[in-house]
Every structure is written in structure tokens, then in C-alpha cells.
Amino acid sequence: MVESQVPLAPALYIFGDSVVDGGNNNDLNTYAKANYLPYGIDFPISVTGRFTNGLTITDFLDISLGLQVPLPILMADEEMQNRIVLDGFNYASASAGILPETGTHVGENLSMRRQVELFRKTVQEHISLHFKSSEKLSQYMSKCLFAVFIGSNDYANNYLQPENYISSRLYNPKQFAELLATELGNHLKDLYKLGARKFIVFEIAPLGCLPYILDKVRPKTRCAENINRMVSIYNEFLAVELQKMKSTLEGSNFVTAKTYMLTYDMIKLSSRYGLTETRNPCCVVAGNGTGACIPDEIPCRNKNSYLFWDSVHPTEAAYKIVATKCFNGSGFCTPMNILELTQEP
């Protein structure tokens, strides 16, 4: 990854789930936490609450953009928010989904709705104080980047858990996918109303290939394709929703990260990406069905050759591949990469 000396955007604001959570869940009443070793074993300041061994996708993107890695919003007090607000914040929360009830069986989280509400508070009570006019505020917001990585839990911790949620009895897979895409669209429109213009929205990865799912379902094929088909339907609806918003929301730009196909490619053609293990996690996971690392157990030695860190989340090495391709590669993030997005007016 190339580190920019001059920031290429004023800030990166991050919304999503555990893939990009920087520690918001640490102080929430939930089982979905990663505030213990071996999580963060390769992160510069060790344990932070990140669900991987080191940097996440958005950490790599911040570095490439020449930005400070933003603080989790729940870790910043009022005084701190005023001081560093223009560097961006991370609103992501493990177990969170597009729907407010998603993931709540394991405890509290910041649903996408709650994340947008917190961002509204940030804009009204902190960002706006730094600008003398609404025009200057709008100029700042229009140059910032907004990364959105959410939706996986609406399947893994909602639709695919009929014992805890009723969504699979209310909707067939197509109806549920359409509901999710529409609801996410509504949240993105709310961000647009607050001034956001440049969005990077990540597809849902092939959940049927996660060790967590494979250990539960034990399919005869390499991945649980029935689950992957559900996710594919959502990704198709997402593409339509983003295209619709691009054509109706003046001045908006939506970059779609094709996470589904890239993850599949990393599994099928692993050697091309320097990976040798794409089925099993690097850390020793608990046998309680959560897929989380057991505290203080020593992980695998060759972490950079593993796709998965625990049974749900990729390694830093995998995240670096994704971030690099999205930042200045071609074909993965469409219709332009992030470097090109920063150059848009």
C-alpha cells in the first residue's frame, strides 16, 4: 500500500459491523467483543477491539489516504470529539446489521440506524462548530469519504437463526434481500441529507464459505452454496439500489466493492494471493459456536498465509489485499477505485 504524504480527503467516516469495528463494542453490554489477545497481536498498540490480528480494511485505507486512523465514536468524549472531529470517526459495531434487531441476541450493538443517528449528532454538535457558514460545511462534507461495510449479520445473526429471529418466517430470500437493500438505501439517503456525497459500499462476502458456517452446516461442497445464493440476491438488489440513488441524488458518487467475487477468488485461486490456508482459522477458536478466538491461545505461525483469522473474520493479510485492490486497483471497486473517487469534484 502507498502512504500519501498529503491527505487525499479531509476524513474517512466508517460505518458497519465487526469487519471494521475499531473498538466501539468494548464498553457495550455484549458478548461480541475482541478486546483480548490474540486479537490485535500484530496491531501497533496491541489489543483495541479489532476482530483480526492487525489492521482492518479501513485502517489500510486511512493510511493510503494519508489520514489518521479514526477513533471509535464511543471512545471519544465531548472534548475530544470537538478537537479531532475533522479527522473522521468510526461508528462500526460488531454484530450490528442494517435491521435494528439484528445481532441483539448476543447483546447491545450500534445498528446502522443508530450509527447514522450518532453521525447526525457529530455533525450538529461538533463538525458544524468548525465552519463559519453552511456552505463551507457542505464543501468539507462533499470531499469526505464514507465507507459502509454492513449486511452480513442480517443473515448470520438474524435470517439464518430462526430460533432467535422471525425474519425467515416473514420473508422468502428474495423479499428479505430486497428489504435489506431498501433499508440500507434509506440510511445512505440520511447520510446524504447530512452532507455525505462520496460513498464506498461493500457487498456481503460469500458467507457460505466462512469456517463458522462450514462447521455448523457441514456441506458436501467446498462452501454452503444455498447460503451464498441468498447473499448473491442481496448483492444484486444492492447494485440496483446504489445505481438508483446515483441517478437521483445530485452530486453523489457510489463506489461498490465487489467483495463477493474477490473472496471467492481468494479461496479458489489462493496461491495467486499468497495464501495457503483458506478453510481453517489461524487462531484457536472456542467450541461454543461463536467462532471467536479463545483468549490468550497462541495462533498459527504463518498468519500471512491464512485467509481467516477466526471463524468469521479475515486476517490482516487478507484485508490488505482487499484494501489495496479497492484503493488503486481496477475491476474490484467499481465504477472507479478510491483514489479516483478522491479526485472527483
Image (spheres, helix red, strand yellow):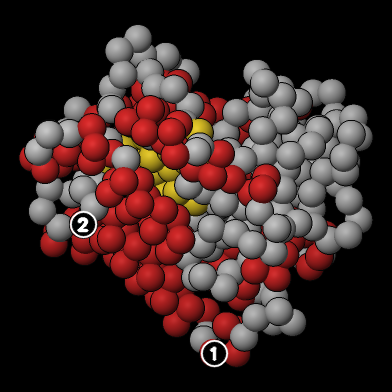
- The first of marks 2 and 1 along the sequence is 1
Of 263 and 65, which appears nearest the observer? 65
> Mark 1: which secondary structure?
helix
Residue found at x 82% / y 43%: 293
Front residue of this view, candidates 20 and 123: 123
Residue 315 visible to an observer of this rendering: no
Label 2: state its secondary structure: helix
Q: Position of residue 340 (x, y in %)?
A: 25, 30
Q: Quadrant of the C terminus?
A: top left
Q: Are marks 2 and 1 in contact (CB under 8 Å)?
A: no
- Along the line of sight, the residue nearer the viewer: 186 or 173: 186
Q: Say which quarter of the image contains residue 62.
A: top left
Instruction: Return the x and y of residue 243 as percentages of the image width and height.
Output: 24, 59
Q: Quadrant of residue 54?
A: top right
Residue at image position (41%, 53%) is 118
Compared to 150, does 342 lie above or below? above
Q: Is residue 50 above or below residue 194?
A: above
In front of the other: label 2 or label 1? 2
Residue 75 appears left or right of 258: right
For the residue marked with disc 1, what is the amino acid? Answer: Leu
Q: Which residue is mark 1?
A: 170
User: Badge 2: few (under 14), some or many (20 or more) residues near its Cα, within 10 Å?
Assistant: few
Side (left or right) of 70 relative to 134: right
- Crowding at dot 1, Cα within 10 Å, few <14 / some 14-19 / many 20+, comes out as few
**Real-space CA distance between mark 2 and mark 1, rounded to the nearest whole angstrom:** 31 Å
In the rendered structure, find residue 157 and report the number of the disc placed on it: none
State the residue at coordinates (51%, 70%). 100
